[in-house]
Image: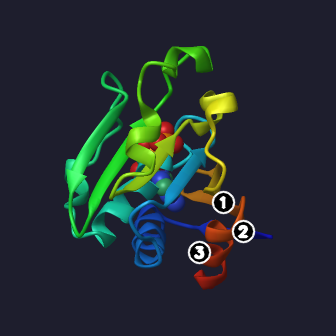
Amino acid sequence: MHKKILSKHYKETIALGTRLAKYLKPGDIVCLFGELGSGKTSLTKGIAAGLNISSNKVSSPTFTLMNIYEGKCPLYHFDFYRIERPGELETFGLEEFLYDNGISVIEWADKLGDFLPKDFLGIKAKHVSDHERIFTLSAKDKRSREILKEIKD
Ligand SMILES: Nc1ncnc2c1ncn2[C@@H]1O[C@H](COP(=O)(O)OP(=O)(O)O)[C@@H](O)[C@H]1O
Ligand SMILES: [Mg+2]
């Protein structure tokens, strides 16, 4: 199952993330794919807003691999842009966060390779024009299918 959502403005992407956050609960994982500037961090800001976290606190954790924000529940925000091989993540302890009491959002999730979790909501962001982005949502397993069903397009 796939859902394609067109965003015509940065604010629409924020609103999409905020809407999405309503259906997320601790332990859920959102994996974001797509090139630089496609809107992954913007969408994460929207998710944060939906969890009562000020969106201007959210930026890509380029040097640290992850940021933790405290909201309705913790938001674990990962950015694996700088990872060159999945093996670099072996000692990172990703799993400890993923299945902890927070929601995980992972930018550049394709860098995870074999470390991709078993179930996650996948979102592929695509640059269409200056202000337009297409987000393609897909479910990997049972829990992510439930989330995807809730999202009206
Ligand atoms: N509809 C839109 N949705 C998201 N971002 C948009 C949109 N239109 C323009 N933009 C701009 O595109 C850029 C997206 O950057 P960002 O969210 O950091 O992408 P990524 O994390 O994928 O590199 C921002 O500068 C944002 O203002
Ligand atoms: Mg980013």
Given this view, does label 3 or label 2 mark the residue nearer the observer?
A: 3
Q: Distance between the Cα atoms at labels 3 and 2?
A: 15 Å
Q: Quadrant of residue 149?
A: bottom right
Q: In this view, does 116 lie above or below 45?
A: above
- Judge by depth and name the residue closer to the eye, 86 or 41: 86
Circle 2: residue type: Lys
Circle 1: residue type: Ile
At numbered mark 3, what does the secondary structure look like: helix, strand or loop? helix
According to the picture, the residue beneath numbered tag 2 turns out to be: 4
Q: How dense is the environment of label 3, judged by Cα within 10 Å: few (below 14), some, or many (20 and up)?
A: many
Q: Position of residue 136 (x, y in %)?
A: 70, 61
Q: Which residue is drawn at 44% across and 67% down?
A: 17
Given this view, does label 2 or label 1 mark the residue nearer the observer?
A: 2
Mark seen at residue 39 = none
At numbered mark 1, what does the secondary structure look like: helix, strand or loop? strand
Q: Is mark 3 within 8 Å of ligand 1?
A: no
Q: Position of residue 107 (x, y in %)?
A: 50, 41
| Quadrant in which the N terminus is drawn | bottom right
